[in-house]
Image: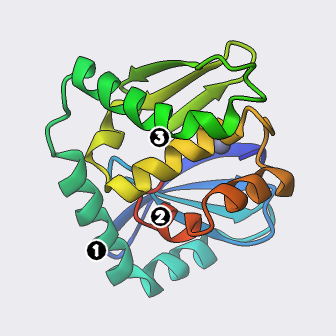
Amino acid sequence: MGAEAGPVQQRQAGDVCYQLARRRVKHLNLRVRSDGTVAVSIPMRASVRQADAFVLAHRDWILTAVRRQQARAAKPLPDRAAALEHFTELSRAVFPAFAGVLGGQMPAIKVRAMTSRWGVCNPARRQITFALALCNEPAAAQEYVVVHEFCHFLVPNHSPAFWAQVERLMPDWKARRALLREE
Ligand SMILES: [Zn+2]
């Protein structure tokens, strides 16, 4: 995040459709979103040909990822009340490690249908919102998201200090995060 987005262009390379954006990034970046769409960002000076060539070179990997995302997205979502109960329970388990910074008060836990993020922490409101679809992700990954959002009560951004907190509480967070669909 943080990079300034240029206009998004719809492109096709071989049989892969993707959205191309120029950003203030150093390297070409590819991601398959939770809805199965493919997004590529390239440095301001890179050419669209380079983007097309990159997509073609990674075609098999991309299409496998797209199919996986689509299969997951097709899973029915749990009902909101059940999801809220579930995430509240997971949050209660993590809360003790943050009781100090939260003044002993459990944050408000909410659940919302979100497609672009797994969770959002609002430290000022002492509130964490989880994506309904997170229920369909592996349990180990759900726990990572809960810890991630709680860590924003300590560090609001994604600076190295933030990741150090995540690492301290959950040394295997990288493996857990890898289980998630692209955030
Ligand atoms: Zn975060």
Amino acid type, callout 2: Arg
C-alpha gap between disc 2 and disc 1: 20 Å
The secondary element bearing badge 3 is classed as loop
Amino acid type, callout 3: Trp
For label 3, the residue is 118
Position in image of residue 41 (x %, y %): 63, 60
Amino acid type, callout 1: Thr
For the point 38% across and 31% down, the residue is: 89
For the point 60% across and 60% down, the residue is: 170
C-alpha gap between disc 3 and disc 1: 22 Å
- Crowding at mark 3 (Cα within 10 Å: few <14, some 14-19, many 20+): many
Q: Nearer the viewer, mark 2 or mark 3?
A: 2
For label 2, the residue is 176
Left or right, 86 with respect to 44, comes to left
Above or below, comparing residue 177 to residue 120 in the picture: below
Name the one closer to the observer, 177 or 146. Answer: 146
Name the one closer to the observer, 13 or 68. Answer: 68
State whether label 1 is within 8 Å of ligand 1: no
Left or right, 79 with respect to 42, comes to left
For label 1, the residue is 64
Q: Residue furthest bottom?
A: 57
For the point 63% across and 28% down, the residue is: 121
Regarding ligand 1, which quadrant of the image does it lie in? top right
